[in-house]
Image (cartoon, grey):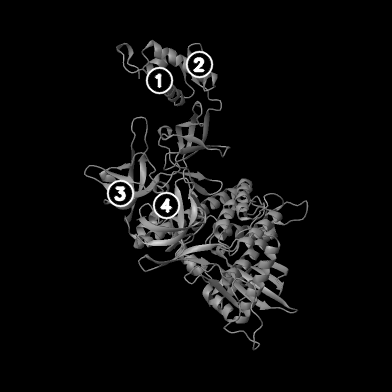
């Protein structure tokens, strides 16, 4: 600021421009005369006043300001004031996503007005400076995305405050001593904001609403992850009480309305620790070489009525959440683990897809009916896998069991299970012939002790027993979607939530093409869905067993779009199904409950459901699915860091699994734990990030770090609080 006649350091044009920008941006709609502007900004020397007029003339020329008269200006709001969503970044590179656009605009921290990630805000676009990107300033927070936060409590002599893991705030949340709810220093707590910053107060004030436990305690840390994502970590008592009142008894009148499968061989095949069995398979031989397979799904909506307290809670949650050491169910335990669960030797109500097919897996006809079943056996995947292998099945070959030597297969119910495996393999073969994309994913798993401590870490690959279940579930979901979506020409299909998957992102596909050509491979980036899928499959076959397999698969997966729920059907690219939905897991997914209800409604001759209402539910379900996946990923990170905390200073063989401008992600070959080598630890050169080719390249020595490279690392740091594992490179 200029000090007037008494002298002092004169304000530069750049400094004054910033002041004028801020002055007008924060007061849109108001017109100011020159005297008001000079007084407000304390411009009390003639040179400063003249400079301010020159700057405002330039701003009017750039359409940032509107010149109202010779002596007055106001902010030009035409295209300058926008509404949208604020995205906060821990590194201060915040952005604003305007409504009707997906192009972010940079918001410097000083102009963020304490907006948080997901908040709806109003911004003013700042005058574009030469050689600078477009910037915006938050001028109003329209609505907060959340008002509850989780973190570590710091209790000092006079004041307490919350420290969030994500460093969400410039200032921590202050908590009056009277609002601690018994919370102690270092405990993990949930805090509700009672007062947001305003023009007079910069601090955020809150009160403790729940105490999660001590920092480092397993339950406290898992609940912290859930709370960070706004996910529920305990079930409401009122909902559990409502579930307790539901009877599991099946009346004679109800049985008479259903097809009876109680005398047909039926089994469930699930993970060994599963309790919520929401699908079962039945099989029986018909005449002329035909088989009848029943895909039986728990009839959850028979017990959970639309609009009930249980339904409202399920709708809000939209999905069960699977952390490493626990499941947070969508439905109360009494329903998901007992009444609805297809437990062995218990009569259960189902909604079923009944398929008649020949031994080549060709489907002759299907029907969708309400049934009653009685499961004969509860299998774990491992048991079925063992039975298949004992009868000559070689996993991963796609070949069914050979003919038995003595005319009989080994093991209880072996004939039925081997036939189910054979039919599943035929279905799978047909699916790939129809251009489904071949991506066999591996999942990171932990063995944990009774305290939740990880004792082993490994990748779990999908085997034939898993694929058996998968294929019949895909068949049921496809059949249901076709039954509603496939209509005669000229007729309109009724509303249904579809599970859709769009074609790959064209730009990312081009990047993949440019990337694989270095290894001598080709991939098609244009053409029909089928041509692109065949090209991707050809690539996956070509890299199988090669050093670059994982690397190419990683880059190819990044080109794929995310599947989502919507009533607007565009088909499923990955599965190559023109019609696909989710019907088979109503115990753990709300869209499946929606589909069950609509199917029943349409079977009874009901009208098409409200499109807008169901699209809204689809969007919510897609969003909650993503949030649940992020929470699951964070729980894996936590356990990974906890597991590797026992191996500090040890050296491992690894490979580069990801490259960013801030460092190299490395995955240990032995146990698949992933950590980061920060870029500032690469002190032998200055490295540039080549995003397109997934490279870090040294400026002086031209040394390259590339995705997939073998590397030796030492475990340097395991920070549980930040869920961060740091490695250093061993030369």
Q: Between marks 2 and 1, how big is the CA–CA gap? A: 17 Å
Between disc 4 and disc 3, whose residue precedes? Answer: 3
Any part of residue 719 in sight: no
Which badge, 3 or 1, comes first in the chain's sequence? 1
- Residue 677 numbered mark, or none: 4
In which quarter of the view is residue 542 placed? bottom right
Report the residue marked by disc 1: 12
Q: Residue at x 37, y 65 (%)?
A: 453
Q: In the rendering, at what x and y percent does residue 559 appear?
A: 59, 51
Which numbered disc, 4 or 3, marks the residue closer to the eye? 4
Callout 2 crowding tier (Cα within 10 Å): few <14, some 14–19, many ≥20:
some
In depth, the one of 553 and 376 nearer the eye is: 553
Secondary structure, mark 1, is loop
Q: Is residue 131 above or below residue 607?
A: above
- Residue placed under numbered mark 2 in the picture: 57
Residue under label 3, please give it.
153
Above or below residue 138? Residue 656 is below
Please report contact status of discs 3 and 2: CB closer than 8 Å, yes or no. no
Instruction: Give the mark, 1 or 4, whose residue is nearer the N terminus.
Output: 1
Q: Residue 651 at what x, y percent from top left?
A: 39, 61
Please state the horizontal and vertical placement of residue 280, each as a whole percent of the image: 58, 71
């Amino acid at each position: 600021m200029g000090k007037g006649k008494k002298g002092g350091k004169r304000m530069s044009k750049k400094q004054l421009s910033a002041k004028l920008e801020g002055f007008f941006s924060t007061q849109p709609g108001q017109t100011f005369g020159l005297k008001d502007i000079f007084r407000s900004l304390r411009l009390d020397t003639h040179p400063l006043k003249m400079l301010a007029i020159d700057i405002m003339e330039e701003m009017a020329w750039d359409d940032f300001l509107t010149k109202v008269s010779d002596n007055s200006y106001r902010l030009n709001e035409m295209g300058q004031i926008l509404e949208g969503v604020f995205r906060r970044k821990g590194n201060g590179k915040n952005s604003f996503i305007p409504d009707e656009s997906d192009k972010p605009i940079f918001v410097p921290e000083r102009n963020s007005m304490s907006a948080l990630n997901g908040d709806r805000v109003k911004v003013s676009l700042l005058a574009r400076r030469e050689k600078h990107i477009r910037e915006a300033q938050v001028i109003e927070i329209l609505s907060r995305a959340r008002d509850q936060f989780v973190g570590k409590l710091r209790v000092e002599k006079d004041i307490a405050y919350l420290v969030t893991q994500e460093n969400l705030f410039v200032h921590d949340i202050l908590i009056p001593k009277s609002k601690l709810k018994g919370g102690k220093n270092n405990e993990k707590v949930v805090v509700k904001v009672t007062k947001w910053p305003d023009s007079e107060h910069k601090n955020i004030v809150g009160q403790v609403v729940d105490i999660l436990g001590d920092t480092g305690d397993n339950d406290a840390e898992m609940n912290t992850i859930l709370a960070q994502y706004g996910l529920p970590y305990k079930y409401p008592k009122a909902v559990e009480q409502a579930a307790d009142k539901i009877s599991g008894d099946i009346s004679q009148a109800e049985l008479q309305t259903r097809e009876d499968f109680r005398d047909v061989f039926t089994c469930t095949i699930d993970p060994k620790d599963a309790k919520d069995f929401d699908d079962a398979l039945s099989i029986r031989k018909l005449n002329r070489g035909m088989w009848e397979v029943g895909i039986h799904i728990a009839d959850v909506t028979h017990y959970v009525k639309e609009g009930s307290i249980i339904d409202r809670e399920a709708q809000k949650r939209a999905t069960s959440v699977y952390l490493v050491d626990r499941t947070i169910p969508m439905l109360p335990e009494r329903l998901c683990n007992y009444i609805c669960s297809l437990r062995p030797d218990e009569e259960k109500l189902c909604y079923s897809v009944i398929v008649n097919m020949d031994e080549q897996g060709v489907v002759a006809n299907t029907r969708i009916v309400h049934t009653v079943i009685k499961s004969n056996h509860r299998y774990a995947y491992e048991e079925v896998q063992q039975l298949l292998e004992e009868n000559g099945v070689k996993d991963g070959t796609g070949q069914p069991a050979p003919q038995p030597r003595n005319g009989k297969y080994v093991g209880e119910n072996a004939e039925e299970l081997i036939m189910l495996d054979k039919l599943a393999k035929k279905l799978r073969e047909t699916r790939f012939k129809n251009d489904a994309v071949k991506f066999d994913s591996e999942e990171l798993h932990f063995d944990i002790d009774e305290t939740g401590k990880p004792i082993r870490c490994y990748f779990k690959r999908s085997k034939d027993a898993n694929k058996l279940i998968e294929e019949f579930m895909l068949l049921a979901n496809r059949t249901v979607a076709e039954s509603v979506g496939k209509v005669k020409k000229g007729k309109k299909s009724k509303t249904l939530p579809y599970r859709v998957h769009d074609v790959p992102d064209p730009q990312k596909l081009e990047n993949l093409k440019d990337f694989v050509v270095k290894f001598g491979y080709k991939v098609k980036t244009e053409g029909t869905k089928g041509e692109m899928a065949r090209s991707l499959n050809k690539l996956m076959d070509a890299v199988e067993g090669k050093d670059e397999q994982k690397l190419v698969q990683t880059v190819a997966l990044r080109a794929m779009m995310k599947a989502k729920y919507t009533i607007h059907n565009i088909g499923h690219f990955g599965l190559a199904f023109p019609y696909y939905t989710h019907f088979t897991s109503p115990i753990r997914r709300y869209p499946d409950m929606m589909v069950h209800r609509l199917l029943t409604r349409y079977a009874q001759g009901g009208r098409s459901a409200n499109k807008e209402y169901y699209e809204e539910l689809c969007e919510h379900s897609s969003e909650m699915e993503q949030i649940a996946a992020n929470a699951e990923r964070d729980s894996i990170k936590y356990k990974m860091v906890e597991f590797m905390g026992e191996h500090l200073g040890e050296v491992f063989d690894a490979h580069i699994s990801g490259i960013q401008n801030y460092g190299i992600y490395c995955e240990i070959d032995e146990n698949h734990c992933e950590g980061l080598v920060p870029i500032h630890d690469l002190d032998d050169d200055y490295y540039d990030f080549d995003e397109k080719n997934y490279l870090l390249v040294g400026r002086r020595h031209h040394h390259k770090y590339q995705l997939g490279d073998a590397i030796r690392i030492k475990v340097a740091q395991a920070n549980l609080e930040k869920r961060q594992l740091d490695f250093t490179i061993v030369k």
